Amino acid sequence: MAEPADGRRRHRHAALGAAPAVIERLWRAGGWLGVAITLVVSLMPPPLGDSAGHADKIVHLTGYAALMFWWAQLVVRQRRKLALAVVLFGIAIEGLQGFTPSRMPDLLDALANSGGVLLGWLLARFLPNLPNRLVALPAWPR
């Protein structure tokens, strides 16, 4: 790896290995977009309303599984810390919902969020290095 002009070495993240830097930046931007969407959707009035019962738990589970899976592609060596951070993010959002007029904190939602984090972690273990795999796909014929 060539050293930049300032003499510091730039270390690529181990999870993305040989993936171009632009892919890493796009993947990271997508992850932060996911965090922002999760925050906004979690604090706005519920789209399913009160009549949905516990169907929203599936939304919580899949949303946090996707969030964890996405970030786990970037964070490999400290996935336990990542998982803890995502679980705490979900708990914090549940707490913030108590300050909104249309939402209430729900322990079952926090459990569904945590279950999603576990599911996302497991999926990332079975499908590691997704950005590298996407880059390695052959180009579509024209």
Image: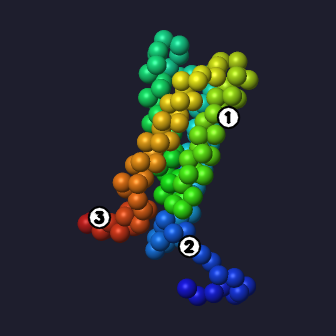
Q: Amino acid at mark 1?
A: Ala
Q: Position of residue 136 (x, y in %)?
A: 35, 69
Neighbour tally class for label 2: few under 14, some 14-19, many 20 plus, Cα within 10 Å: some
Q: Are marks 3 and 1 in contact (CB under 8 Å)?
A: no
Q: Amino acid at mark 2?
A: Arg
Residue 120 visible in the picture: yes
- Disc on the earlier residue, 3 or 1: 1
Q: Is residue 10 left or right of residue 118?
A: right
Neighbour tally class for label 1: few under 14, some 14-19, many 20 plus, Cα within 10 Å: some
Residue found at x 46% / y 48%: 121
Please name which of the two marks, 3 or 1, marks the residue nearer to the observer: 1
- Label annotation for residue 92: 1
Secondary structure category for the residue under label 2: loop
Q: Which residue is mark 3?
A: 140
Q: Amino acid at mark 3?
A: Trp
What's the distance in space between the residues labelled 1 and 2, CA to CA? 31 Å
Where's the C terminus, which quadrant? Answer: bottom left
- Disc on the earlier residue, 2 or 3: 2
Residue found at x 62% / y 46%: 85
Observer-nearest of 97 and 115: 115
